[in-house]
Image: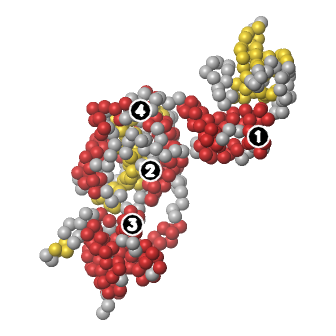
């Protein structure tokens, strides 16, 4: 029969020898394994007290019963120190910390806070500093993953077999199958311009079957040796849901890099999208139009609004706009030009320009910025081609057709990926390890989408404004706006 106070659990400093790496707790004292020896077909574990200053001679001998429990064969409790149980509480807490660190996807700080908040104050007082606990968590995670050595530059990257493939789910209910994971690798020959691309067969099929794509990059989820993690999403048919399907690690954001990466993706899929929504990044726009001739490139309305707000700040107008109702209304009118029918954009801009000139000359520099970048400067009775044509940022047709006007769903998936990573700028192999789990969670989402389940509620403000925007777009009439 097992001793009523006997406990055996993993040590926070587990060794590599078979059977070692365990802690025995008995009557408040802590013991570690000194040796394991077989006596008459019985495997015996010889434990010695972990108190070291001075060295304690207390010993315990145990064997494992048929139920898998350690049973005391002999106990020599010749302790040379006072046994209070506090040391056992600390060792047990460290073991819990290590176990949670290895199994949980929570951040390092969350793991530490969960453990610290669940123990008595006297035990917490005996724990090492929070910085030391943080290192313990990080070591435990690194050991549990057994990841290869971190590459220091793009030339040192060698992807082992375990990261070349992934188990892919069949969204139609079939058995899991082995799928490729690394689909693009330009290799060492590319030098500092090396490009990597990751996905699974089921996600490639999802992207292949979508007519509308969304793209965006995230810098926090990218390893330090790369510039960004660039993600290609498929819009799920008939919904505002986007599915992250392909993940590029890019060394920079030049037009040449985008062109090469997108060409690899096109060759892999064998199809082209009808439309792509992206940020206002000219090199990316040019690459899309070069690789996918005839594609409709749309700018995200949120990023359009963001650029106007940023320029407002650059001009030192933030406080004026915040405190003046009329200035706020005129700024909103500048943004609302994006909702006009494309043929009415020039007249709409002229209308807002006249309002600004007559009532708010302080906004004149902001209007000039919008005209130069998004409308085109007037010259000799016509307008120069702006950096971003109205066809790129106009959302009138997208609103009427019920298509997304922003790539906010992409930002949401970035946040979800960050929760998987638990760290900014992860190591290269940490990213690959976590990305494999992330792809499997996306495949689970595909199964729900196929069953017409929603993955999340559309923001309430969008639900409320959608009918009004649709009505405004279908009943728009200049006669009702312009003075007689």
What numbered label is drawn on residue 310? Answer: 3
State whether residue 353 is above or below residue 118: below
- The chosen color scheme is secondary structure
N-terminal-most mark, 3 or 4: 4
* Mark 4 residue crowding within 10 angstroms, few (<14) / some (14–19) / many (20+): some
Could you say which is closer to the camera, residue 261 or residue 82? 82
How far apart are labels 1 and 3 at the CA level?
51 Å
Give how far apart the Cα atoms at labels 1 and 4 are. 40 Å
- Residue 79, percent across and down? 84, 23
Image quarter of the N terminus: top right
The label nearer to you, 2 versus 4, is 4
Residue 151, numbered label: 4
Q: Nearer the viewer, residue 137 or 379?
A: 137
Q: CA distance from mark 2 to mark 4?
A: 30 Å
Q: Are marks 3 and 4 in contact (CB under 8 Å)?
A: no
Mark 3 lies on a secondary structure that is helix
User: What residue do we see at 56% from left, 30% from top?
Assistant: 143
Q: Nearer the viewer, mark 1 or mark 2?
A: 1
Residue 374's quadrant in the figure? bottom left
From this view, report whether residue 234 is shown above or below residue 138. below
Q: Which residue is mark 1?
A: 123
Residue 285 locus on image (x, y percent): 28, 55
């Amino acid at each position: 029969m097992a001793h009523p106070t006997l406990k055996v659990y993993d040590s926070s400093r587990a060794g590599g020898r078979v059977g070692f790496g365990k802690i025995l707790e008995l009557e408040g004292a802590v013991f570690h394994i000194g040796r394991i020896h077989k006596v008459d077909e019985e495997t015996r574990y010889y434990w010695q007290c972990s108190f070291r200053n001075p060295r304690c001679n207390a010993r315990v001998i145990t064997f494992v019963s048929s139920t898998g429990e350690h049973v005391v064969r002999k106990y020599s409790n010749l302790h040379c120190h006072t046994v209070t149980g506090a040391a056992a509480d600390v060792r047990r807490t460290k073991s819990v910390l290590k176990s949670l660190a290895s199994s949980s996807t929570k951040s390092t700080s969350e793991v530490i806070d969960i453990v610290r908040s669940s123990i008595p104050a006297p035990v917490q007082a005996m724990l090492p500093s929070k910085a030391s606990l943080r290192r313990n968590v990080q070591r435990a995670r690194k050991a549990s993953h057994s990841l290869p050595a971190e590459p220091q530059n793009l030339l040192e990257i060698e992807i082992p077999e375990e990261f070349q493939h992934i188990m892919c789910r069949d969204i139609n209910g079939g058995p899991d199958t082995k799928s490729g994971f690394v689909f693009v690798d330009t290799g060492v020959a590319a030098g500092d311009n090396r490009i990597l691309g990751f996905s699974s067969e089921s996600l490639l099929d999802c992207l292949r079957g979508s007519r509308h794509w969304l793209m965006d990059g995230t810098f926090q989820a990218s390893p330090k040796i790369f510039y960004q993690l660039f993600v290609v999403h498929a819009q799920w048919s008939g919904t505002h849901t986007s599915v992250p399907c392909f993940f590029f690690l890019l060394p920079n954001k030049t037009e040449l890099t985008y062109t090469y990466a997108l060409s690899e993706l096109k060759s892999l899929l064998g199809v082209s999208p009808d439309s792509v929504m992206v940020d206002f990044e000219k090199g990316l726009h040019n690459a899309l139009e070069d690789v996918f001739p005839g594609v409709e490139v749309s700018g995200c309305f949120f990023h359009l609004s963001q650029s106007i707000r940023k320029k407002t700040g650059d001009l030192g107008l933030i406080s004026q706009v915040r405190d003046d109702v009329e200035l706020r209304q005129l700024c909103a009118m500048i943004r609302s030009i994006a909702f006009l029918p494309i043929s009415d954009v020039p007249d709409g801009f002229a209308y807002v320009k006249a309002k600004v000139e007559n009532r708010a000359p302080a906004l004149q520099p902001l209007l000039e910025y919008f005209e130069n970048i998004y409308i085109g400067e007037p010259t000799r009775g016509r307008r120069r081609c702006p950096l971003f044509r109205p066809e790129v940022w106009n959302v009138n047709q997208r609103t009427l057709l019920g298509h997304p006007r922003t790539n906010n769903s992409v930002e949401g998936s970035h946040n979800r990926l960050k929760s998987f990573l638990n760290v900014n700028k992860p190591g290269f192999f940490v990213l690959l390890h976590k990305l494999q789990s992330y792809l499997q969670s996306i495949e689970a989402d595909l199964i729900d989408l196929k069953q017409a389940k929603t993955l999340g509620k559309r923001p309430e403000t969008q639900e409320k404004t959608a009918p009004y925007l649709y009505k405004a777009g279908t009943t728009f009439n200049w006669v009702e706006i312009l003075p007689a």
